[in-house]
Image (cartoon, rainbow, N blue to C red):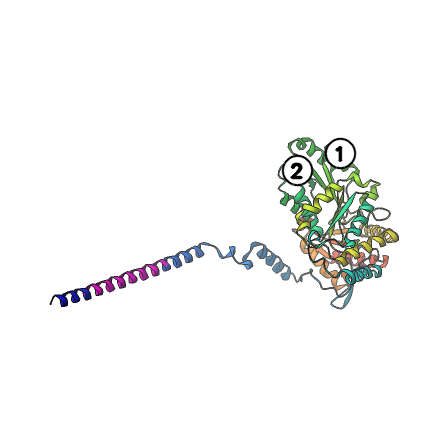
């Protein structure tokens, strides 16, 4: 009896233990389910707290604004004037969708993009070096063509050295963004290019604009502000790409000396265009290369390639070469592009008549436009001349109307410029004929009257 009792007790204990275990597991399961439900509910609650526009690209305010602009244009029967597909080399003439056009939407100022000598240089570089530098120049090593191009640029600028970058926009962003900081001041023309502004933002430097080409206003700013900062940079352009005018560079040089500041000149549109031999605003004013601290230029206009460069003293170039992020962490310029730019520079120096013809055609266009009563703003008639319409709608309508007449010219609309300054922007090439210019101005005048 005693053994049976013990055995019965043992069975009861086992059942009790099993029951407690099951109950614990059930409670745990219920707890886990509840926690998951709470977490899921919390997640859903948090999701509903975040407006959809903050995680959907099609609701981004910038995209919504773009759609509004496009819808407004469509209501007036205006198709998108941008991103036209060119079937051939774009210079004074081009082919779009198989149709020929007189072209005023190209930076091919000297007609060197497509020049046989330039094209052959690029092809030879492909055969020798391939199509890519394949890494940054610090990692992948130099190619002789890179240094040949940089030495040639330094020589025409009369500086110690030069450095080429794969993007003109990035040249300004990384150079300014790296060289200056929060204790510095950057003073720039009010119409300066976006790449300069982006570089200033990256640098964290203080920024003050001065009225367009107004060196007196600049001097007054520095008179009051110079002593508050460590380094000060003054930035101007050689030719302003929207207006086609240029600064009184000697006046800016005098100010930078007296105020102990650096001076940077962006020659994107003036190199190959200004000066007797096309060597830019420096040659136009008869200045020495070392009178400006930072020369910047692009390789995509007169030099028929792509990218940008900085020319200046050895310390500046060496500093950027070893430390500037936009150079150090970027792939090197493709060898065929470097070869094409060098060949184009050789053509520029060997064929100065291209520059002379470009300047003649630019002056001719400006004179004919003014005679037709077209508002050309402050253009100097070099390679860029606007036809100011006063509204983005009119600019787009004029561009579309001229396109139907075989003339390709792009509208510049708000926010690229102020609404009252909306315009057509004509880029002149040395290959434009006087007949093309006369017929274009005549068509432009007729279409303005129709509006």
Q: Which residue is mark 2?
A: 185
Looking at the picture, how far across and down is residue 419, in whole percent?
66, 50
Relative to 224, residue 46 above or below = below
Left or right of residue 228: residue 440: right
What residue span does the magenta drawing correspond to?
Answer: 12-35
From the viewer's side, name the closer residue of 291 and 313: 313
* Residue 28 shown in magenta: yes
From the viewer's side, name the closer residue of 21 and 222: 21
For the point 84% across and 49% down, the residue is 278
Disc 2 element: strand
Disc 1 element: helix
Of pointers 1 and 2, the one earlier in the residue sequence: 2
Q: Main secondary structure of the magenta part?
A: helix
* Residue 172 shown in magenta: no
Looking at the picture, how far across and down is residue 49, in whole percent?
44, 54
The quarter of the image holding the C terminus is: bottom right
Mark 2 nearby-residue class (10 Å; few <14, some 14–19, many ≥20): many
Relative to 216, residue 113 above or below = below
Looking at the image, how many numbered discs can be counted on the residues? 2
- Visible residue check, residue 99: yes
Left or right of residue 274: residue 415: left
Q: Which residue is mark 1?
A: 257
For the point 14% across and 68% down, the residue is 4
User: Marks 1 and 2, how far apart in space?
Assistant: 16 Å
Looking at the picture, how far across and down is residue 250, in whole percent?
79, 38
């Amino acid at each position: 009896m005693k053994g049976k009792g013990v055995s019965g007790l043992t069975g009861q204990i086992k059942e009790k233990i099993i029951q407690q275990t099951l109950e614990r597991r059930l409670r745990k399961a219920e707890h886990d389910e509840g926690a998951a439900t709470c977490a899921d509910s919390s997640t859903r609650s948090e999701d509903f707290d975040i407006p959809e526009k903050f995680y959907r690209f099609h609701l981004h305010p910038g995209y919504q604004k773009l759609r509004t602009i496009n819808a407004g244009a469509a209501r007036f029967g205006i198709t998108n004037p941008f991103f036209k597909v060119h079937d051939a080399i774009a210079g004074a003439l081009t082919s779009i969708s198989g149709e020929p056009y007189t072209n005023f939407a190209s930076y091919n100022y000297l007609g060197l993009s497509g020049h046989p000598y330039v094209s052959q240089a690029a092809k030879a570089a492909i055969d020798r070096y391939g199509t890519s530098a394949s890494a940054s120049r610090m990692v992948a090593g130099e190619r002789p063509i890179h240094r040949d191009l940089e030495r040639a640029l330094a020589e025409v600028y009369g500086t110690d050295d030069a450095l080429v970058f794969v993007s003109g926009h990035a040249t300004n962003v990384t150079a300014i963004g790296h060289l200056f900081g929060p204790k510095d001041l950057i003073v720039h023309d009010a119409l300066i290019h976006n790449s300069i502004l982006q570089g200033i933002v990256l640098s964290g430097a203080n920024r003050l604009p001065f009225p367009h080409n107004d060196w007196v206003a600049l001097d007054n700013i520095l008179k009051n502000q110079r002593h508050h900062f460590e380094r000060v940079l003054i930035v101007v352009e050689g030719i302003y790409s929207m207006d086609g005018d240029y600064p009184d560079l000697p006046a800016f040089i005098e100010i930078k000396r007296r105020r102990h500041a650096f001076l940077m000149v962006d020659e994107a549109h003036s190199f190959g265009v200004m000066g007797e031999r096309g060597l830019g605003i420096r040659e136009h004013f008869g200045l020495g290369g070392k009178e400006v601290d930072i020369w910047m230029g692009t390789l995509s206009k007169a030099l028929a390639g792509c990218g940008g460069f900085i020319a200046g003293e050895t310390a500046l170039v060496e500093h950027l070469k070893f430390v500037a992020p936009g150079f150090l962490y970027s792939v090197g310029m493709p060898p065929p592009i470097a070869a094409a730019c060098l060949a184009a520079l050789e053509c520029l120096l060997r064929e100065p008549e291209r520059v002379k013809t470009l300047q003649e055609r630019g002056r001719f266009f400006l004179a004919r436009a003014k005679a037709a009563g077209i508002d050309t703003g402050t253009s100097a008639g070099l390679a860029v001349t606007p036809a100011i319409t006063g509204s983005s709608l009119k600019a787009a309508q004029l561009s579309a109307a001229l396109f139907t007449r075989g003339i390709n010219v792009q509208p510049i609309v708000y926010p690229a410029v102020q609404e009252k300054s909306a315009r057509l922007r004509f880029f002149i090439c040395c290959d434009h004929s006087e007949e093309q210019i006369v017929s274009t101005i005549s068509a432009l005048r007729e279409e303005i009257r129709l509006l």
